[in-house]
Structures are given as C-alpha cells and as structure tokens.
Amino acid sequence: VGYNNGVSISGSYATGIVTNTANYTGGLVGYSTGTVSSSYATGAVTSSGNGMNYTGGLIGYATNTVSNSYANGDVLASGASSSYNTGGLIGYSASTVSGSYATGNVTGSGTSAQNLGGLIGYPAKKAFGSSLSPEVTEFAQGIFAENGALFCGPGGERFVYELRRAFDLYCKFTPLEP
C-alpha cells in the first residue's frame, strides 16, 4: 500500500523486496494514517535518491496505532545529501507502538544521515515521552562538562536519541569487540 488514508489494516503481510526513489517507503505501507495490527513484512526495503525521508521495514510514516506487527527485512536509505528517519519497523512514528518488533539491519547514508533506529527512526515525543529523568540529565551534563563520554549497550536506542536531542550531540555507532 503506498498511501493508507485512515483504513485499518489487520492480518496483512508483504514478502517482496521494495525499492523506491522517493519519500515514504515501507515494506507494507509507505504512508499510513490508519491503524496497523497483526501484520508483517519480510522483504528488504531500499529507498535511494537525493533527500530520502521516512523509510521503514513495515511502514515509512505512521500517524496511528501500530500493534502486534513486525518486519525482518534489511532497511537501507541512501542519498547523496541525506537520509532521514529510517527504522527497522517504522521510519517516522507519531503513533503508539505496542507488541511489535524488527530484526533486520538498518542503514542510512549520505552526508547528513539522521534519525536511524533499529525499531523506529524518529519517534514523536508526544507518543513516547522522554527517557531522560532530571537526574540522568544532570549526570550527563557533568560528564560532558569534563569532556567525558557515555557508552550505551544494546537496547539503548531511545536513551541515545534523547541524549542527542538534549545536548545537540553527534553520535558514532561502532560495535565493540569483546
């Protein structure tokens, strides 16, 4: 589905490879204002061109509830200048997400690639709140004031995202070797 204008999608799936040279690319839905539940996508999703935005393994851009759904294909957004809002499940989410997951690799490239996430590329704050308590913010301020660094393990995506926003940080994600 390229554009879902408020229709509920349930029990649906897509297994093919999706390739697009424009915005709003998803393994099942490109742009969705309707609910999506108990659905999945298994193919790779690739969005390439200049200024690619909103690329997700299941949905590129979601504004309504997504529940009990998953994506397990790799997601790639690449462009000469930018690739914004790229996620394993949803590229940009202004929705509530529950009981859902993604297992594919997520890659964004370009000179200003931003908002990459294993589950959601850019989660809207109104839907998810903030993971930074005042105590955590104060601790991070102290670390950064001394030119220190914070390391996050697997599952720290939301924490890293909030730190980047709060402190206007550049983050480099490099896997650590044991």
Image (cartoon, rainbow, N blue to C red):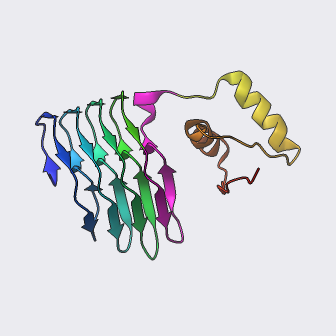
Please indicate whether residue 169 sits to the left or right of residue 89 in the image. Answer: right
Q: Is 52 displayed left or right of 37 in the figure?
A: right
Residue in the image at 44% along x and 64% along y: 83
- Which residue lies most toward the front here? 178
Q: Residue furthest right?
A: 146
x 10%, y 36%: residue: 7
Residue 121, position in %: x, y?
A: 44, 48
Horizontal side of 160 relative to 61 (left or right) equals: right
Magenta-drawn stretch contains 122: yes
The quarter holding residue 71 reads: top left
Q: Which range is magenta?
A: 103-129
Considering depth in this image, is 107 or 33 the residue closer to the camera? 107
Quarter-of-image position of residue 49? bottom left
**Percent x, y for residue 124?**
42, 37
- Residue 86 in the image, given as x and y percentages of width and height: 42, 54
Q: Assess whether residue 144 is covered by the magenta stretch.
A: no
Total numbered circles: 0
Residue 172 x/y as whole percent? 66, 57
* Residue drawn at (40%, 57%) of the image: 74
